[in-house]
Image (cartoon, grey):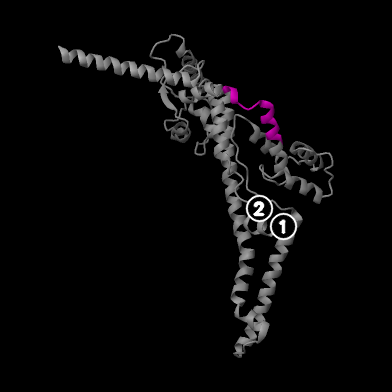
Amino acid sequence: SVFSYVFGDGNPNGDVEERRIALVAEMIRQNGGAVTAEQLAPFCDDAPMPLSESSGKLGEERAYVDESFVLPIVTQLDGEPQVSEEGDIVYVFPELMTSASSSGSSLVNSNEVMRLRREARVLRRAGLEEDVPTSMIKNLLNMNGVSTRGALERSDLIDILEKVLPEDGGSSSSMDVDVEDPTLLQEREYKFSLASSFQTVLAGLLGVVNLGGALYLGNIFGQYALYGVRLPSYMGALQTFFPLLLGYAVLFNAIPLVRNIWIQRQNDQIRQRNAVRKSWRNLVGEKAGNIRRKLMAAARMGKRMKQLGAGGGKDIVFDTKREFAEVDKKRETDAMNDFDELLKQKENSAWE
């Protein structure tokens, strides 16, 4: 708890990139592989705040000329910008749809996903990391006098932990819902310490006692220093290393203070980014004005991508009904056939 009080417990959003890619990839697949910048905005960090309803301009012709905030996601998922017949930019992800076709059998069952989300929510309420070892969960319950008899699996311990946790006052319930929302990426706010309030208070009192003791010794040593007296034995060693003791006591109190100020600023930025993402999600859900037109254009383009395999021929980029290995093999075969034709043409011209 002392280490947690002084240095904190790490970044609560260490997995934000993995969650971002997983959520946006699922959204793209659900929309047929073609989406707009407005649909990608809830997953971006640098998206601007959309116009508010109070301005009276929500959903009007307000398409952003600069959509550079989507470039990191588009580049990472091998997306391609295309222009619709109406002149709107639509981002297509053919490689993502191809990989979805080849790995469809390995998708995680929805019930398993919900179980993992519930487990993560319970552990966060208990102040634990999502990947905490099962033995630590059991030790936490036992230390608080909670019986774990009959708990054979991790899920059993999670059930017991959820029952003994106090009712959530509502401060984090909305955050849990947002984290679980498959259409929205929400960052978790930093906590000063994952230790209990009692442990945090004890660590703070320890810091005060250390600083008070160091100042008291400094006053004593200062009086002897005025007369040039060097104390013998143990007190002499303390007098020699007093600057280090004072530095330790000051840092023990200064680091948490500075870290608390830094945490407040980081949480303000996190809340702002979360609010922007939620505003974009709501805007897309309303489908107002030109947003509806762009969504319809993306839907048409997604259907066209799915139908590419209907006509056959070499113009097929990919076919969602066929395995990736089969598509890759066909590409190699077509390339070899083209090479053979060019070689025959060269030989014929040489004989002529």
> Which residue, given by chain and number where applicable, does mark 1 sit on?
200
Q: Amino acid at mark 2?
A: Phe
> Which residue, given by chain and number where applicable, does mark 2 sit on?
192
Residue 115: x percent and y percent? 70, 32
Look at the picture and state if 262 lies above or below 214. above
Q: Residue at x 70, y 62 (%)?
A: 204
Residue 95: x percent and y percent? 46, 25
Category of crowding for the residue at label 1, using alpha-carbon neighbours closer than 10 angstroms: few (below 14), some (14–19), many (at least 20):
some
* Magenta stretch holds residue 109: yes
Badges 2 and 1: C-beta atoms under 8 Å apart?
A: yes
Q: Left or right: where does residue 57 sit relative to residue 329?
A: right
* Magenta stretch holds residue 19: no
Residue 275: x percent and y percent? 59, 37
Tell me, yes or no, if residue 247 can be seen here.
yes
Q: Secondary structure at mark 2?
A: loop
Is residue 166 or residue 296 the one in the foreground? 166
Tell me where the magenta segment starts and ends, as one range: 104-118
Residue 209: x percent and y percent? 71, 69
Tell me, yes or no, if residue 56 can be seen here.
no
Category of crowding for the residue at label 2, using alpha-carbon neighbours closer than 10 angstroms: few (below 14), some (14–19), many (at least 20):
many
Q: Residue at x 59, y 32 (%)?
A: 184
Q: The N terminus appears in which quarter of the rendering?
A: bottom right
**Dominant secondary-structure state across the stretch colored magenta:** helix
Q: Residue at x 84, y 46 (%)?
A: 146
Look at the picture and state if 43 lies above or below 266. above
